[in-house]
Amino acid sequence: MIEQGAVAFVTGAGSGIGRETALAFSRAGCRVAVTDIDMAAAGETAAAIADGQVLPLKLDVTSEAEVIAAFEAVLSRWGRVDHLFNNAGIRGQACEAHEMSEAEFRRVLDLNVTGAFLCQREALRTMYTAGRGTIVNMASIMGFTTGPGALQYTTSKHAVIGMTKAAAFEAAPRGVRVNAVAPGTTETPLMLAHAGDVQTMRDRYTPAYPMGRLGRPEEIADAVIWLSGSASSFVTGHTLAIDGGYLLR
Ligand code: NAI
């Protein structure tokens, strides 16, 4: 249950999980700021929102100036930001810890952690003024565990879970909830690029999933909508794994 006409702000909304969640927010009755570093992709997602109110914006979340400007643009258009889905992120190159360059480590941390921090900060500022709001940060099963060649990604997603707890603790008395989602391998362009093609992706990752399949972007979107709505009104600081049983192994 999401308030009709509420404003949702989605980062990395041009593709994959962000795109599906922007569509889901619109179906739930929200006005949606569809932001992405790739303006053409943001425009495509916005075009897929047929009859809803939508604002496509170019936003590189690693730029403090762009993050501030994007929130200002949404506030000037609609006067409020009720829900942030802090989704933009990259996996990085598969590389063992002892061989990883400083540049690669910084690149992934800069986007997955600092970018999420900046968007969360701007959202908290406007939500504190309003005395209400929800934030869902994008973690991963790699925020709980790890895998080969993923030190930078693992580090970043563990950090997102910590950031979620720290913000939730401060935000709770101010009427703002902060949670995270931790998907297992989900069939998106990010994972396709990582694996090469669909069959390689499925062959490589499916054996680790007790459900015998990978996730779908809409299954993550459903969880984000639940964590953003009144159905989860007593939930904060939580990271929800959506992983087909991966973490049970
Ligand atoms: P995707 O690659 O399909 O979409 C990511 C979007 O983020 C793209 O539209 C891209 O243009 C945008 N983006 C890249 N850099 C950006 C930046 N600096 N500023 C703003 N936008 C930027 O990826 P997917 O799979 O939908 O992933 C989204 C999030 O979900 C990421 O944070 C990822 O770590 C996380 N995740 C994905 C999983 C998967 O298996 N696909 C599993 C667990 C977490």
Image (cartoon, grey):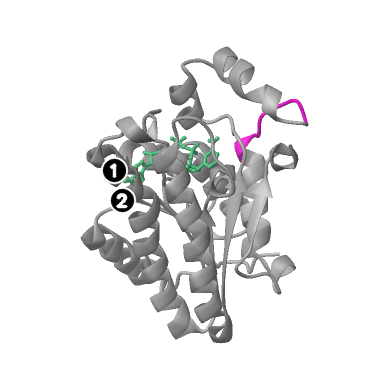
What residue is shown at x 62% (from left), y 51% (from top)? 27
Q: CA distance from mark 1 to mark 2?
A: 5 Å
User: Residue 113 location, x and y as percent?
Assistant: 38, 55
What residue is shown at x 61% (from left), y 59% (from top)? 29
From this view, report whether residue 60 is shown above or below residue 29: above
Q: Mark 1 Cα within 10 Å, few/some/many (few <14, many 20+)?
A: some
Q: Which residues are magenta?
A: 211-217
Is residue 193 among what the camera can see? yes
Quadrant assignment for ligand 1: top left
Q: Which residue is mark 1?
A: 107
Prevailing secondary structure class for the magenta stretch in the rendered image: loop
**Is the shortest distance between ligand 1 and the CB of mark 1 under 8 Å?**
no
What residue is shown at x 68% (from left), y 28% (from top)? 208
Q: Is residue 246 shown in magenta?
A: no
What residue is shown at x 46% (from left), y 69% (from top)? 81
Q: Which residue is mark 2?
A: 110
- Image quadrant in which the N terminus is located: bottom right
User: Residue 3 location, x and y as percent?
Assistant: 63, 69
From this view, report whether residue 198 is shown above or below residue 159: above
- Numbered disc 1: secondary structure: helix
From this view, report whether residue 234 is shown above or below residue 140: below
Q: Nearer the viewer, residue 132 or 201?
A: 201
User: Residue 100 location, x and y as percent?
Assistant: 31, 34
Is residue 14 among what the camera can see? no
Q: Nearer the viewer, residue 232 or 185?
A: 185
